[in-house]
Amino acid sequence: MRALYLDLRRARLTRRTESRSIVSIALRIAAGALSPITWAARRMIGDPRAPEIAAPRRLFAASVGPTSYYEDSCASGLPVVLLHDVDPAGSASDVRVLFDGVRAGRPVLAIDLPGHGFSRRTTRCHRDDYVRWIGEVLTDVARRFGAVPDVVAVGTTGELAARALAGAPRLARSLAIVAPTGFGEPAPAHRGLGLGRAAFAVARHPGAGWVALGDPRIVTDVYATLHVPTCFVHGEASTSVAMAIDMLVMRHPGFRRAAIAGTRKLPHGEDALGTVDALRAFWRSLDTRPQLRIIRGGLGRTRGSLIGESLRRERATARLRGLKEVKRWI
């Protein structure tokens, strides 16, 4: 009897071991089949706080809370301040391609907006809070570098930066808005990011999502009142956007439009080199100073109609008065 009992027990243990082995094998097969899905999900939901810019990260004490930013000040010249879009999963890493494209020739800073990336905030931020925060950041940059910066803002953040500079134009030398909003196309809620990553960011930063930041009247109420040289960098997704920008540019000599060929919604994400080249061309135009042309005796010839009818009248007046030269900025 004892021998029979032992045989039955061994048989039960064997069946349990076999069933566990089968379950283990099945689980491994399932895990192997789902691993690509798991990898894709991790890529989509990836932690937006992970540092992706190869530069020192520092903190700035702002009124809304500690502000994190990346800085590379190895090069000389006027600083460049990069501001990412305000989508829920946005962070300074979204402008990494611009950071890397500019850092060789200019000091550059990429800022995490309040409640995004590594930046924290003590209160929920609304439009005026973001505008005040941008003013604080630009004031600090000007103080540290001894010169006002060129500002590059993406998407809806461009509206906020424009509001800040409309009230204090001396805080920056220029403003470039990449993928500008307010010209007839609504800003996409997630700017091409997966819903999972956006949900993760909102969960990690409660209230960091889409509060009322965009303004349908931004063109007439803010852009049209700017006294800072401004460049609108956009893709080719919509001709109506280009036409609306052109109407604004025609009324403001300091404005310009740059279309990045072959791109659509996010030109810096689709063609980083082309976007950086457009920004550099814009900045070079700001470095050009008017030249003083001296016209000897008031009778010197000019090339074509470069001087224009008004200057010809000045030359005639100078000749009548017996002046030896006429000076004019052209």
Image (cartoon, rainbow, N blue to C red):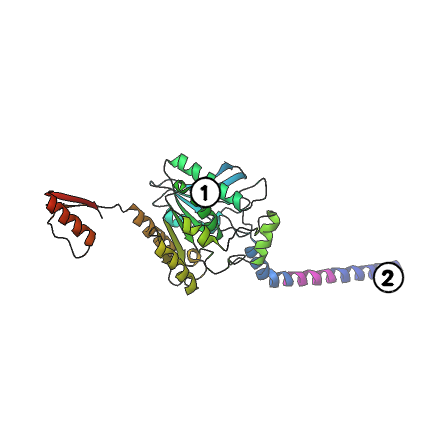
Task: Give the prevailing secondary structure in the magenta stretch.
Answer: helix
Look at the numbered discs 2 and 1 and tell me whether their residues touch, using CB distance below 8 Å. Answer: no
The range drawn in magenta is: 18-29
Instruction: Report the number of numbered marks.
Output: 2
193 lies left or right of 219: right
Q: Residue at x 17, y 48 (%)?
A: 314
Tag 1's secondary structure?
strand
Is the residue marked by circle 1 packed among few (<14), some (14-19), or many (20+) residues within 10 Å? many
How packed mark 2 is, by other alpha carbons closer than 10 Å (few <14, some 14-19, many 20 or more), is few
Q: Is residue 248 above or below residue 322?
A: below
Question: Is residue 256 visible in this depiction of the protein?
Answer: no
Amino acid type indicated by mark 2: Leu
Q: Is residue 20 magenta?
A: yes
Q: Position of residue 217 (x, y in %)?
A: 48, 54
Q: Nearer the viewer, residue 212 or 226?
A: 226
Q: Residue at x 59, y 41 (%)?
A: 123
The amino acid type of the residue labelled 1 equals Tyr
Q: Residue at x 88, y 58 (%)?
A: 2
Q: Is residue 276 magenta?
A: no
Residue placed most toward the observer, 191 or 184: 184
Instruction: Return the residue at label 1.
Output: 70
Of residues 329 and 49, the one drawn nearer to the viewer in this rendering: 329
The residue carrying mark 2 is: 4
- Which of the two residues, 56 or 236, is positioned nearer the viewer here? 236
